[in-house]
Image (spheres, rainbow, N blue to C red):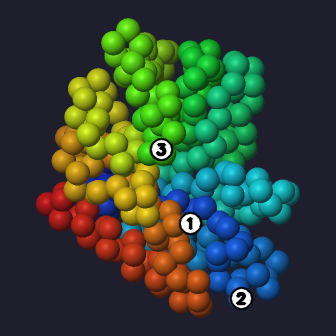
Amino acid sequence: MTQDQLINQIQKKKSFLCIGLDVDLNKIPQHLLEGDDPIFEFNKAIIDATHHLCVAYKPNIAFYEAYGLKGWQALEKTIKYINENHPEIFTIADAKRGDIGNTSSRYAKAFFEDLAFDSLTVAPYMGKDSVEPFLAFEGKYTILLALTSNEGAFDFQTQKVNEKELYKHVLETSKTWKNSENLMYVVGATKTEHLAEIRQIIPDSFLLVPGVGVQGGNLQDVCKYGMNDNVGLLINSSRGIIYASNETDFAQAAAKKASELQQQMAEILN
């Protein structure tokens, strides 16, 4: 998928919503547990109910790895279902990978070629040679962790190195890497006070913004400081949408929550 195609979807749907598919068998409706593949059946129902309201889906890979082979098979079925039925939707493997070159190449091959995700989240701590193998895949995007929404982000990311916050060094340095046009960045919705400065460094890049909803991030503030001429935002909501209900109406409840966010986004875009 190209960024132009993603932008077209945002304009068409009046939405820049990303839905996180973080499946916890302790939280999904009990009747689904009677089936052979409750993880996929849950995801399928959520996708069927919300695909017209969002432009991206983001499975957090840990929620699938935790269930071993069955979890991985459910992930494979989920991404295949999205790609076959809704190829216009941008897919994000939230795996936060990052290792030396040869290992990174294997991770990239697994998610970009075997599973056919459009993008993958990557940790930048090991530097250039750990990220460029991901950037080498044409038509695929590497979403670099820049400034995350968790409390521990202040341990390192905002610490000053040579009188500049570390996350700013990450942003500036990443622009010099080969195929850096294939970079997007994670910036947490709870860090809106930094968004204006982030946009000065990467004015044209897409930002994946988790933390709106359950984590307390404010959509209007994120858009005020983070939106660019092409919108440039993918606002993620996971628990607030997919666990809106744990009864048989769970998919309809998820669609209602997604619609509420989409309508707010439409108002902002207008």
Q: What is the number of the mark on residue 151?
A: 3
Q: Residue at x 52, y 72 (%)?
A: 242
Q: CA distance from mark 1 to mark 3?
A: 38 Å
How many residues crowd mark 1 within 10 Å: few (<14), some (14–19), many (20+)?
Answer: few
Identify the image quadrant of the C terminus: bottom left
Q: Residue at x 18, y 65 (%)?
A: 267
Q: Earlier in the sequence, mark 3 or mark 2?
A: 2
The label on residue 51 is: none
Q: Nearer the viewer, mark 3 or mark 2?
A: 3
Q: Nearer the viewer, residue 127 or 56?
A: 127
Asked whether the beta carbons under mark 3 and mark 2 sit within 8 Å of each other, the answer is: no
Please report whichever mark, 1 or 2, sits nearer to the chain's N-terminal start: 2
Q: Nearer the viewer, mark 1 or mark 3?
A: 3
Q: Amino acid at mark 1?
A: Asn
Residue where numbered disc 1 is placed: 85
Disc number at residue 31?
2
**Residue 259 as seen in the image, left or right of residue 59:** left
- The three-letter amino acid code for the residue at tag 3 is Glu
Q: CA distance from mark 3 to mark 2?
A: 36 Å
| Residue 82 drawn at (x, y percent) | 58, 62
Q: Secondary structure at mark 1?
A: helix
Please say if the residues under marks 1 and 3 sit with CB atoms less than 8 Å apart. Answer: no
CB-based contact (under 8 Å), mark 1 and mark 2: no
